[in-house]
Image: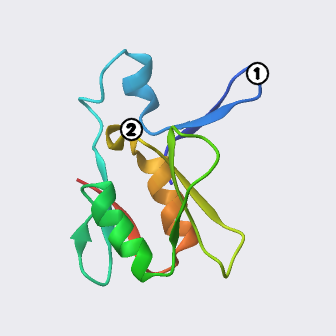
Amino acid sequence: MSGVWVFKNNGVIRLVENPAAESNGMNGGGSRRKVLVHLPSGQVVTSYSSLEQILKELGWERYYGGDPDLFQFHKHSSIDLISLPRDFSKFNSVYMYDIVIKNPNMFHVRDM
């Protein structure tokens, strides 16, 4: 992951991928958008329905419980849980890298 981790006073951290653009108030015009790619098929994930289909093939199941604002998946063979914002427009590189880490050699994050 590239970027800068920003620590807030309340203990919350977040990854800023383009700190110069954010500090200048730009809306990401100078930064490149990231995409999640399923490596075996070369398919770019463009919706949660396509992501859900791929994750099901990898043994992940929908997890219904907890926060209604999250779209979640779990695997019976592990303690991992993938939590994503219900709104796909908020699906960013932090969530993409979480999927990459929990599915080695199956996904990759690329600049668009």
Q: Is residue 7 above or below residue 107?
A: above
Tell me: 26 left or right of 95: left
Task: Give the residue type that dot 1 points to.
Answer: Asn
Q: Residues within 10 Å of mark 1 (few under 14, many from 20)?
A: few
Query: Could you say where residue 74 lies in the image, as x and y percent from the top left?
Result: 59, 67
Q: Which mark is residue 10?
A: 1
Task: Give the residue type that dot 2 points to.
Answer: Lys
Q: Residues within 10 Å of mark 2 (few under 14, many from 20)?
A: few
Q: Is residue 27 above or below residue 37?
A: above
Query: Could you say where residue 54 lies in the image, as x and y percent from the top left?
Result: 36, 74
Q: How is the image coloured?
A: rainbow
Q: Which mark is residue 90?
A: 2
Name the residue located 24 percent from the left edge and 56 percent from the top edge. Answer: 46
Q: Secondary structure at mark 2?
A: helix
Q: Quadrant of residue 5?
A: top right
| 78 or 13: nearer the viewer | 78
Query: Could you say where residue 100 lies in the image, as x and y percent from the top left?
Result: 49, 67
| 33 or 43: nearer the viewer | 43
Name the residue located 38 percent from the left edge and 16 percent from the top edge. Answer: 24
Name the residue located 66 percent from the left edge and 34 percent from the top edge. Answer: 13
Q: Is residue 112 above or below residue 7?
A: below
Query: Could you say where residue 111 lies in the image, as x and y percent from the top left?
Result: 29, 54
Q: Earlier in the sequence, mark 1 or mark 2?
A: 1
Tell me: 63 left or right of 106: right
Q: Which mark is residue 40?
A: none
Q: Is residue 35 above or below residue 102?
A: above
